[in-house]
């Protein structure tokens, strides 16, 4: 499941703080996890998605959601 893998990644990342990973990087990944979880709940009405079912459409929807709903992704000029 996508969020399970994401959470496991973040737990391992936390162990690396000060060893090539900054606390800010860890914080950013946790924020991304929370936003992605929120997106899945809003868009698909489920708590998690099978990673094998992810496709380009999912990525496009997530990217659009980050840009429009969360206003997070900016394009450099």
Image: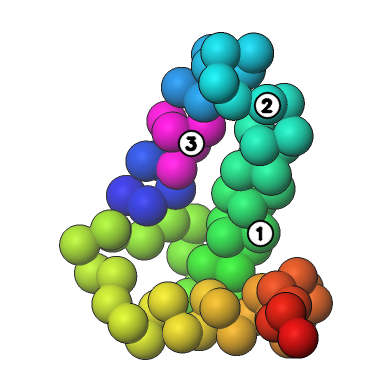
Residue visible at 64% across and 80% down in the picture: 65
Report the mark closest to the observer, 2 or 3: 2
Per the image, the residue denoted by label 2 is: 22
Task: Give the left or right position of residue 3, taking residue 69 as reference.
Answer: left
In the figure, residue 55 lies in which quadrant?
bottom left
Magenta highlight range: 6-10
Per the image, the residue denoted by label 3 is: 7
Q: Main secondary structure of the magenta part?
A: helix
* Nearer to us in this view, 57 or 28: 28
Q: Residue furthest right?
A: 71
Report the mark closest to the observer, 2 or 1: 2
Q: Can you give x and y, in whole percent of width and height, for residue 26 in the image?
A: 64, 33
Was residue 47 drawn as part of the magenta stretch in this picture? no
Q: For mark 3, does the 10 Å Cα neighbourhood hold few (<14), some (14 to 19), or many (20 or more) residues?
A: some
Q: Quadrant of the C terminus?
A: bottom right
- Residue 35 bears which disc, if any? 1
Q: In the structure shown, which secondary structural element does the residue marked by tag 2 occupy?
A: loop
Q: Earlier in the sequence, mark 3 or mark 1?
A: 3
Q: Can you give x and y, in whole percent of width and height, for residue 1 in the image?
A: 32, 49
> Do the residues under discs 2 and 3 have CB atoms within 8 angstroms?
no
Task: Give the left or right position of residue 57, taking residue 23 as reference.
Answer: left
Q: Give the CA distance from mark 3 to mark 1.
A: 13 Å
Q: Residue furthest front?
A: 77
Q: Is residue 52 above or below residue 9?
A: below
Q: In the structure shown, which secondary structural element does the residue marked by tag 1 occupy?
A: helix
């Amino acid at each position: 499941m996508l969020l399970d893998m994401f959470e496991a990644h973040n737990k391992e990342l936390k162990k690396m703080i000060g060893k090539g990973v900054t606390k800010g990087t860890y914080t950013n990944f946790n924020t991304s996890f929370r936003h992605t979880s929120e997106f899945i709940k809003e868009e698909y009405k489920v708590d998690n998605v099978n990673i094998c079912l992810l496709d380009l459409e999912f990525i496009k929807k997530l990217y659009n959601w980050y840009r429009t709903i969360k206003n997070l992704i900016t394009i450099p000029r």
